[in-house]
Image (spheres, rainbow, N blue to C red):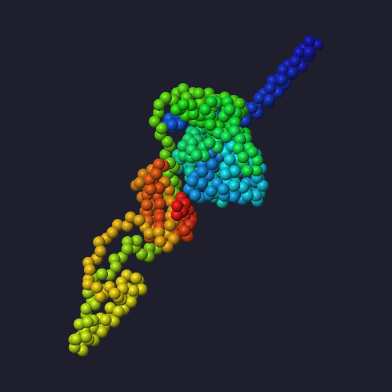
Amino acid sequence: MKARRKQPARFGLFFMTLAFCVALAPVVSFAAPYAAMVIDARNGKVLHSRNADTRLHPASLTKMMTLYIAFEAVENGEISLDTKVKISKNAAAEPPSKLGLVAGQRIALRYLIRAAAVKSANDAATAIGEALEGSEAAFARRMNRTAKALGMSNTTFKNAHGLTESGHMSTARDMTTLGRHVLYDYPDYYNLFSRRSTSAGIKTVNNTNRRLLAAYRGADGIKTGYTRAAGFNLVASAERGNKRVIATVFGGRSTATRNARVAELLDMGFTRSASRVALRKPDVPNYQGTVKPAGKTIRVATAVKKSLRPVLRPTQATEQQAPVVADATTADTTLVASATVIEHDIQSALLQAQEDGSITLASLKEEPTPPPEPKVVTRISTAGGRHWGINVGRYNSRYAAEKMLLKTALAEMATLDGSLRKVEKNSRGFEANFLGLSKDTADLACRRLQARQITCYTLGPS
């Protein structure tokens, strides 16, 4: 009897252990990998890293790239903040978090940007991508070109919102790099990420990062992210005194534990960073390498029909033949016949020259003059509505900008022939511009260049 009484106790202990293991298994199997990165934002110096180059699911940190491209497009004149974007069925069908957009409605781009930045709305992010590139797939290709130009070498984007998709991966290092570019490349828009709430047109939305913004002194952004595969992610930036630190965490277990870890990393960053550091902003993105691979031949789209160098106008050669007509009137019959032939040739040449606009009959009566000295054209005429231009990129050096202008001129002779190539330096780099075009020609040139995956936007008369 005693043996029979002990047997249920053993079975009871076995089942309790089994139940505990089963209960624990989901927690272990669905725990996302952890990664972290801390930098001094002023010069990009790495202060701490752990698994920083491991490719993981970025979740809604993806929207930093969507917003970066939106800011870039607004600044480049591709679209305006007041442009009414028509919402597609695809965008409206995105799962939460979402703004609640309806297929067919129109909403200003500025509200989509606010919803994506503050509420992390997936429908708004998809609508932004479709508005800029026509489809989410095309926008993902632009995201990847931009990532490459920013030096995000271990990132691949497949969508604009960050929901889990095969191959859609990034790293803590790359997302820290992106956060730093958002901060310094578009400071006028960065304040969006610090708003606790904002109007998104159809309703007011609250910031998904409001807890850290409220709890950590100096915090002013940037972006949260969560999916089951990614865990709780965050790229955060904070400023105290003359120091600014950016910290990134992948794979947090909850909002609270993630925020606590980010706070620890920010504290570490402020402790380890030097008091005085020269500000060294990140380099502006160089899209040249993403347009044409190194060593690839640039082929001219159409056959070359004429030289870009202007042909010299007729001068003394034509003018010195004029006296022959006068001398022929006093010569014998043979000379008259010869002079008649010469006169016929001269008249034919004059008619052709008059049609070309290169010579007039009145100029034959004047004394021969030496040809004018060649002049260097430094400004192109704006007569005839040629007040427009195009920009084909911003570069780190004048040489790189001039090189791109020459390559583009050879690749697009049909529309750019006769335009003025000009490099303009500003605080962000060297702008490569073609000037002296009509509006229609500028629009056509940009469309043709963009079809070849060459970055281009038009420049208005202002």
Task: Determine the residue positioned at 31% across, 78% down.
Answer: 348
Q: Residue 244: percent from the left, percent from the top? A: 47, 29
- Image position of 189 (left or right of 339): right
Task: Determine the residue positioned at 43% across, 51% down.
Answer: 391
Q: Residue 26: percent from the left, percent from the top? A: 65, 28
Seen from this angle, which residue lies furthest right?
1
Q: Is residue 306 something that shows in the picture?
A: yes
Seen from this angle, which residue lies furthest top?
2
Q: Quadrant of residue 387?
A: bottom left
Task: Determine the residue positioned at 38% across, 45% down.
Answer: 425
Q: Residue 421: percent from the left, percent from the top? A: 37, 54
Q: How many marks?
A: 0
Q: Quadrant of residue 63?
A: top right
Q: Is residue 7 above or below residue 395?
A: above
- Image position of 81 (left or right of 332): right
- Image position of 176 (left or right of 420): right
Quadrant location of the N terminus in the rendered image: top right
Q: Residue 249: percent from the left, percent from the top? A: 54, 30
Q: Quadrant of residue 389?
A: bottom left
- Image position of 128 (left or right of 383): right
Seen from this angle, which residue lies furthest bottom?
333
Query: Viewer-proximal residue, 431 or 174?
Result: 431
Q: Is residue 402 above or below residue 121?
A: below
Q: Is residue 47 something that shows in the picture?
A: no
Q: Is residue 238 above or below residue 324?
A: above
